[in-house]
Image (spheres, rainbow, N blue to C red):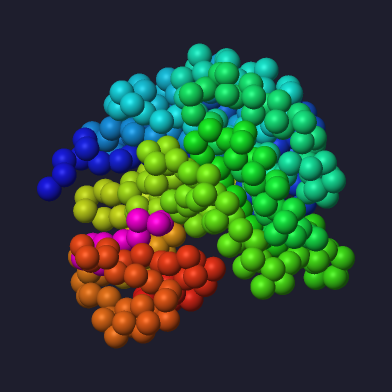
Amino acid sequence: MISREQEAFGVYVHWPFCLSKCPYCDFNSHVRHAPVDEERFVRAFTREIETTAARTPGRQVSSIFLGGGTPSLMAPQTVGAVLDAIGKHWSVAPDVEVTLEANPTSVEATRFRGYRTAGVNRVSLGVQALDDSSLKALGRLHSAREALDAVAIARTAFDRYSFDLIYARPDQTPAMWTDELKLAISEAAEHLSLYQLTIEEGTPFFGLHAAGKLKTPDEAMARALYDVTQEVCAAHGLPAYEISNHARLGAECKHNLVYWRGEEYAGIGPGAHGRLDIDGFRHATATEKRPEAWLMRVEANGHGVVTDDLLNSEERADEFLLMGLRLAEGIDPKRYAALSGRALDPNRIKVLREEGAITVDADGRLRVTQSGFPVLDAVVADLAA
Ligand SMILES: C[S@@+](CC[C@H](N)C(=O)[O-])C[C@H]1O[C@@H](n2cnc3c(N)ncnc32)[C@H](O)[C@@H]1O
Ligand code: SF4
């Protein structure tokens, strides 16, 4: 059995503020017109880290992810104080990966060196698109030039960086996307996150879409755009290691692998989720989402946790399947059987193999194929039934 020290343990820290709200985004992000009291947040983050660490003694932190919102609005000293608190209350692996999500504006890029000095060793930039009209339509505050300049600064400040693009945008064709993707790959070093535009309920895009004023690609076009993504990235040495994430071999985001491999992680800050193994049970935790309400809870109770559910074996196994099948490496069905107490149905596996949606390796690992990925939800539902 692998000892605790050798297992991955991630810490996610959520910074819930943005300069403006993008019309497609349903992340827990808020716009505030008065300055945010960062010192008060540092005190609250520190307390919640201390409380969470007391529930999970003996862990060694293998990855930290400062996500948002827009964490690049934090002062470097704020980031440094949060990282110090993590190092004080948990032990931290010598090769810890510390990622910070940044918006690619010129103002934010001026802080990159400060983040590196604070202990960040990887940035993930929300570039979203490489042409100005798309950026405007997405409600972004930066131009393509500014974003590429921020990428160039990231390259000088960090050994590791990644950026995000959103595709399957209105009126985007495979030819346009191919050109944009090739430009992105020439600017990317080792990692790219490529998300299909999702119309999220409750966002301005949802209303526009429902009213017929925002036309997204139909299923066939979305599929063609997805296929182009896989082909162009693989041909340039950035194959998908997860449904929306591409990396050179060995450059995968360690932190996100923690989620997809069903490993353990702590969620710190407003609206953060965690999965903690305590006394042999897996806890699914979530904190208060509203930033000021979260602050008050932490100040009163030492933590902002509002949900702390014990997952039963079936829930654990379903989550393992749902997350693990997103990965190109797939899952080990023996692990599924150990978690759920029952093996996956061989007949369902046979049918899905015949349909070309999954493969089973010689060593027994089960993987979703390129044609299975666009219908991943149906594949998972079928296997879990
Ligand atoms: C939490 S956001 C943070 C990044 C940072 N705040 C920014 O916008 O640059 C993470 C990524 O999710 C993606 N994303 C957010 N909403 C999306 C949507 N509705 N459809 C597709 N991708 C989305 C974007 O690519 C974004 O960069
Ligand atoms: S996409 Fe990023 S910047 Fe835009 S609202 Fe969401 S978290 Fe904030």
The image shows residue 304, relative to residue 339, as above or below, that is: above
Left or right for 212, reference 51: right
Magenta stretch: dominant secondary structure: loop
Q: Which of 320 and 374 is in front in this view?
A: 374
For the point 82% across and 41% down, which residue is it? 132
Residue 95 vertical placement versus 184 (above, below): above
Image quadrant in which you'd find residue 368: bottom left
- Residue 340 x, y percent position in the rendering: 25, 69
Image location of residue 288, percent across then percent down: 55, 47
Considering depth in this image, is 245 or 317 the residue closer to the camera? 245
x, y (%) of residue 58? 23, 34
* Front residue (pair 22, 351): 351
Report the residue at 35% width, 56% height from top: 329
Residue 38 visible, this orientation:
no
Instruction: Identify which residue is drawn at 27% across, 65% down.
Output: 361
Q: Does the magenta stretch include residue 19?
A: no
Outermost front residue:
235
Horizontal side of 285 relative to 174 (left or right) equals: left
- For image coordinates 22% across by 75% down, the residue present is 342
- Magenta-drawn segment: 327-336
Residue 81: give x, y in percent of width and height.
Answer: 49, 19
Q: Is residue 322 visible?
A: yes
Q: Which of 294 and 4 is in front in this view?
A: 4
Q: In which quarter of the image is the C terminus?
A: bottom left
